[in-house]
Image (tube, rainbow, N blue to C red):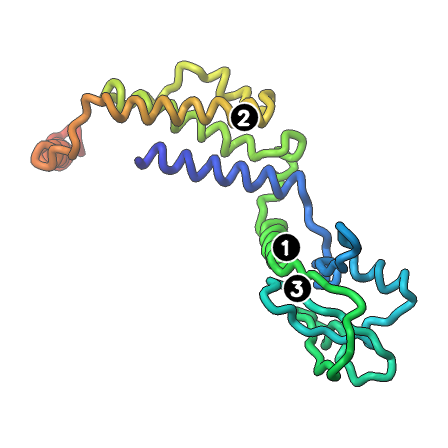
Amino acid sequence: QTFAGYAAAQIRKARGLNKKMNHPQPEMRKPLLAFCHVLVGAGTQPLADWLQSQGWEAAHCGLSRMPHGHDLYALYYDPEADFRGIFTGEEVQEVSLSSIPKGCEPVAHLYVNRDGYKRHGREHREYWDWVAQRNESRYQESQGQGYDTKNMMHTFRLLQMAEEILRTGHIRVERPNREELLAIRAGAIPYEELLARVEALLADVEAAAGQSPLPEAPDEARIEATLVDIRSQWYFSPEGR
């Protein structure tokens, strides 16, 4: 679990880095307006474009919730009415609801993609937090490959060692596939190919775990005896000192 669990975390990290490197976020977060669409026929039109096509102003609009319509609003327009507009305040996080006079008919229906707006806000924040905290030299080194090559190399090394430990019961630190690992470190292997190899390695680890000769739990008495023996040699033998 120590090896494979850490390697799996590195895979998630590499995937997240790949997404951030290849899908940068604009410096300014998109406003809620960008996630508002007016229902037109069998499709939709961005609210800003729809208002412009009508020659109308958002300040003269009124909104009321649609019964049983998730994030759906009836939109009214009247320059003479005391409507609250579509948005209020500088930091717009929500649409405004107005008191609609009896008998007033909606001119359109508005869909507000709140889930998309929240997701964009989260991804925008995570991206710029990553920009502020990233290791610039590592980033420049990995930019051409679209993923963190060092993390990916260690992912392969750890998964291969995990499979060997489960299969043989021994730890081999010096790796026999040094050239392959260095090629990964150099970004010589495409990202998608690496992910496919990683998935195969994870399957190998799972298979090895099911047939491993290793005991279910470590022999704590043997471990303690070994530790005592090592300390005794270190503290009481002339060579140890």
Q: Is residue 65 placed above or below 118 in the rendered structure?
A: below
Residue that appears at 69% across and 50% down: 25
Q: Position of residue 187 (x, y in %)?
A: 59, 25
Figure quadrant of residue 99: bottom right
Amino acid at pointer 1 = Gly
Give the left or right position of residue 237, taking residue 111 as reference.
left
Marks 3 and 2, how far apart in space? 50 Å
Image quadrant in which the C terminus is located = top left
According to the image, label 1 marks what residue?
Answer: 116
- Specify which label sits upstream in the sequence, 3 or 2: 3
Give the left or right position of residue 216, taking residue 196 as reference.
left
Q: Is residue 173 placed above or below 221 in the rendered structure?
A: above
Q: Position of residue 57 (x, y in %)?
A: 86, 71
Label 2: few (<14), some or many (≥20) within 10 Å?
A: some
Question: 54 or 91: nearer the eye?
Answer: 54
According to the image, label 3 marks what residue?
Answer: 72
Q: Say what secondary structure mark 3 lies in.
A: strand
Image marks 3 and 1: residues in contact by CB distance under 8 Å: no
- Specify which label sits upstream in the sequence, 1 or 2: 1
- Tell us which disc is closer to us: 3 or 1: 3
Amino acid at pointer 3 = Leu
Amino acid at pointer 2 = Arg
Residue 232 can be seen, yes or no: no
Residue that appears at 25% across and 21% down: 170
Q: Say what secondary structure mark 1 lies in.
A: helix
Image quadrant in which the N terminus is located = top left
Q: Position of residue 34 (x, y in %)?
A: 74, 58
- Give the number of the disc on residue 185: 2
